[in-house]
Amino acid sequence: MHIPDGFLSPPVWAALDVVSVPAVGFMARRAQRTAADRAPLLGVMGAFVFAAQMINFPVGLGTSGHLVGGALLACTLGPAAASMVMTAILVVQALVFQDGGVLALGANVLNMALIGVMAGYLPYRYWANTPLRRAGVFLGGFLSVLVGASLAMAQLAASGVSFTGPVLAVSAGLFVVTAVLEGLITLAVFEAVERLNPGWVNTPAGAGSRATGLLAAAAVLLAAVGVLVASGSPDGLENLAEQSGIASRAVTLFTTPLTDYEWKAAGGEWLSKAGAGLAGLAVIYVLCSMMGRLIGRPRNS
Amino acid sequence: MQYAVVDEWSRGGSWLHRRDARAKLGVLVLFLLAVSVSPAQAGWRVGAFGVFPLTALLAARLPVAGVLWRAAAILAFTVPFAVGVWIAGEPDRALLLLLKSYVSALACLVTVGVTPWTRLVQAFRKLGMPPILTQVMELLYRYLFLLAGQAAGARTAALCRGFAGVPRFQQFRVAAGVVAVLFGRSLERAGRVERGMAARGFRGEFLYAGAVLWVWQDTVLVCFSMTGVIAAWWVLR
């Protein structure tokens, strides 16, 4: 999952670096606010993740796996602090252990420390105070790895690295197996930590209801899988425009990477449509959250 | 521990070791940029960029075989991908990916091998990285070896107590318990570190003894390296 230097094309790594720098700055400010004077805690927990990766979990067929840690950190330290710890880990891995590149650091930070951690935290955030708590922790671990790995593959595809169908299928299969394993390990460790001391676990105050969580999961599922059963026929307005001949006079002023609800760089038809759907969902979620905060902010009279 | 090897290399006293970390980071980024934007037509000739880290390696008197071998760790990730690209019918691109990633990893390793970690973090801080991130990086590196040692000890203890003989499901639970205990110990250690630092008057920023100042030799290093790297890129273009 750690993309090394030389794999991403300059426009891709440069764009991801440009996106990651302010995003890390934003998370650093949040972490500073919520975890002020707690740098020792975050540093030692980063070292813990490294150390925990040395402990192997048997998974059968003579193989073993280890904890990745993004979701576990998010559930115990909170998302902003977890993002900082994961970013620090990625910098150390890139510089000292040759695991991931320096120019590709923006991509790796975005995949694993920012989006990966948030994907790992959201199910727990919504289900922490419901009977689905355990499912939330498992899903968090699962999503943190799957989302990070899928983004890495998409970025490689956008850089022109070509994959044949079988290679892509094997990679996707490996990602799902690794993600399930991360979910199971995260859940097992989380429960063991909670048994040792319930105070070590971060339970979000005013966590969302089970309905909100299910709604979020349904939206993600619909965006990713709904395209498989969606009709390919034009909608009413497009049909009318085609029949009246207006459609042929349409002028495209500019194009975006998600034109026609397809993310061309992603490759296959399903992947490109699902990618566009998920990207759109993320953009709308961020915009609505920002607007909600703006509207809900108390005004000084 | 194997990780400590790079730390030992970085404590050398060569001309390169004494240079400002900002200069070395600047040269590294420029080098990686040149390798990244070198055209696909350059093919195997991209390997010629390897002359730069090799020269630095010899100038810094680092163990050549050790550094070359350690940089090969990157191949664990890149070889499977290169094979996939090869199978997809692009052997030239596969070779290019391998060369670019190896040369980049080598340059990175040489830079870290001639710069102590505290100096690197100091340079990141001076270059505008958020203080909380640099502090986390510094403490992470400091406690990494200690906690990794504890994890190795816990693993040995579990094996001595017959961990390998118990059913697989039980092994999974035992491993989770070991990680949870490590988590608890890390939290306790973090608490002690926090209290110790507060008692010594920690105000949210580390103070370094003997800060390195930018001197004319650093400018020479940057100018010399820039000229060489740009010239190499121009020839390969």
Image: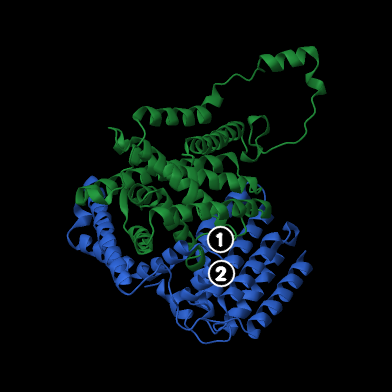
Chain colours: A green, B blue
Which residue corresponds to mark 1?
Answer: A101
The extreme right residue here reads A249
Q: Are marks 1 and 2 in contact (CB under 8 Å)?
A: yes
Could you tell me residue B89's position as x and y percent?
66, 48
Instruction: Give the structural element (helix, strand or loop) at label 2.
Output: helix
Chain containing the residue with disc 2: B
Residue type beneath disc 2 = Cys
* Label 1, residues with CA under 10 Å away: few <14, some 14-19, many ≥20: many
Could you tell me residue B107's position as x and y percent?
59, 71
Residue A261, label in figure:
none
> What's the residue at 65%, 35% (across, down)?
A258
Residue type beneath disc 1 = Gly
Q: Residue B215 versus residue B146: which sits nearer the camera?
A: B215
Q: Are marks 1 and 2 on the same chain?
A: no
Could you tell me residue A210's position as x and y percent?
34, 29
Chain containing the residue with disc 1: A
Which residue corresponds to mark 2?
Answer: B108
Q: Residue A136 versus residue A151: which sits nearer the camera?
A: A136
- Residue A39 is at least partly visible in this image: yes
Q: Is residue B193 above or below residue A161?
A: below
Q: Is residue A196 left or right of residue B235?
A: left
Could you tell me residue A283's position as x and y percent?
56, 37
> What's the residue at 66%, 47% (across, down)?
A160
- The alpha-carbon separation of the residues under discs 1 and 2 comes to 9 Å
